[in-house]
Amino acid sequence: MAEVKINRDEDFEKALKRFKMQCKKEGILKQFRERQYYTKPSEKRRQNVKRKRRKSKG
């Protein structure tokens, strides 16, 4: 879980930006989007194959 401690003289916006970066680094939003809807195992395999093909071409 992402956690950010705010210093007394620190801006809220700056702390929020650090929190967002930490969430992105940990992959929290990506994981949420993946778990939002159920995908069958066969569909997951197809998506992984597509992803690997795109990575190898580009």
Image: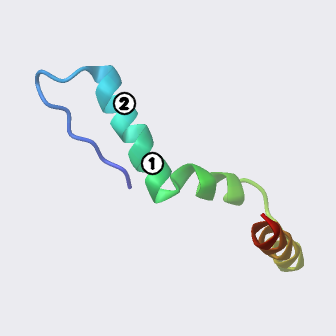
In the image, residue 2 sits, relative to residue 41, either above or below, namely above
Q: Quadrant of the N terminus?
A: bottom left
Q: Is residue 42 left or right of residue 19?
A: right
Disc 1 packing (10 Å; few <14; some 14–19; many ≥20): some
Residue 4, position as x, y percentages in the image: 27, 42
Instruction: Please state which amino acid type lies under the numbered disc 2.
Output: Leu
In which image quadrant can residue 39 be found?
Answer: bottom right
Q: How many labels sit on residues?
A: 2
Q: Position of residue 20 (x, y in %)?
A: 44, 39
When asked about the image quadrant of residue 31, the answer is bottom right
Q: What type is the residue that disc 1 sits on?
A: Cys
Q: Nearer the viewer, residue 39 or 54?
A: 54
- Which residue has dot 1 on it? 23
Q: Residue at x 88, y 75 (%)?
A: 46
Which label sits on residue 56?
none
Q: Residue under circle 2?
A: 16
N-term mark: 2 or 1: 2
Q: Is residue 17 above or below residue 12?
A: below
Q: Residue furthest front?
A: 58
Q: Callout 1: helix, strand or loop?
A: helix
Kindly report the distance in space between the C-alpha atoms of the residues bearing marks 2 and 1: 11 Å
**Spot occupied by residue 17 in the image (x, y as percentages of width and height):** 39, 32
